[in-house]
Image (cartoon, rainbow, N blue to C red):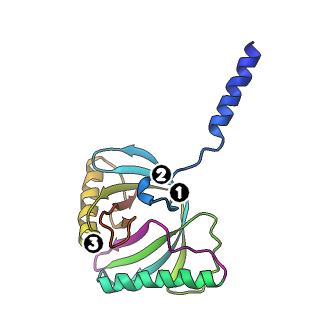
Amino acid sequence: MEKTLLVFVALVLVSSCKGQKWTPPGFCHQKKCPEFKVVETNQDFEERLYVATEWITTKVESSKSSDLMAAFSRLKNYCQKQNEAGYEISDDVWPRLITVTEGEDSSAVSMSWFVPPGTKTPENTDESVTLQSRPEDTVYVRVFGGFPSIESGQENAKLLREALAKAGKTFDPNTYSGVGYDHYISFTHHNEIWILAV
C-alpha cells in the first residue's frame, strides 16, 4: 500500500510539473510577448523577472511625432523586407518600446519591437535596424492608462523613480522605456514604464 501511494504521489507531481506553459496576460491581446514572472507587487509598481529576449531596434532622431513615425516605418519596412527574403520577423507583436537614455546634455531615444522566441532572423545587414539580445533581467514596472505620449511617459518615469527610491530599490536612474501594448488609435491603452534593476 505504501509503495502504491508513493508511486501515485510521484505521478501527480510529474504530471503537475509537465507541460506548464506560460500564458501571456490579457494586455498582450493573445499575441506573443516577452515571458515574465511577477516577483513582487506593491501599490506603486510591480517587480518582474523577464526571460532573455530578442528585439529589433532603431534610433529615433528626436521625440517629435514625425521622427517616431519614421522609426515605426523603418521597423515595419525591415520586417516586410526580411519576410520577403524568407525570414519570419513579424510586425504584429507586443510590446513596442521607446527607450530614453538621459545624459547631461542630451537624450538618446530608440524604438524596439519584440521578436518572439524561435523566430528565424537574418544576419543583420541593415545599418538603421539592429538585432538586440537582452539577458534575463529584473524590471520595475509602472502601469498607466490614457493616450500614450512622450509627456505621459516622462511623468510616469518620474513617479516610478520616486516610488523605487522610497522603497529602497536600486535601479538605473538614467534610462527608462515607455511600453505600449495597443494600437495608437485604440480607445483604451495599457501603457507601462520599465526601469531596469541594477
Between residue 168 and residue 87, name the one nearer to us.
87
- Measure the alpha-carbon separation of dots 2 and 3: 26 Å
Pointer 3 residue: 149
Q: Residue at x 24, y 58 (%)?
A: 159
Pointer 1 residue: 136
In the displayed orientation, state which residue is furthest to the front. Answer: 187
Element assignment for label 1: loop
Which region is colored magenta?
Answer: 86-106
- Measure the alpha-carbon separation of dots 1 and 2: 7 Å
Q: Earlier in the sequence, mark 2 or mark 3?
A: 2
Tag 1: residue type?
Answer: Glu
Q: Which secondary structure dominates the residues rendered in magenta?
A: loop
Q: Residue at x 53, y 87 (%)?
A: 127
Between residue 181 and residue 111, name the one nearer to us.
181
Q: Earlier in the sequence, mark 1 or mark 2?
A: 2
Q: Residue at x 41, y 83 (%)?
A: 71
Horizontal relation, residue 15 to residue 93: left or right: right
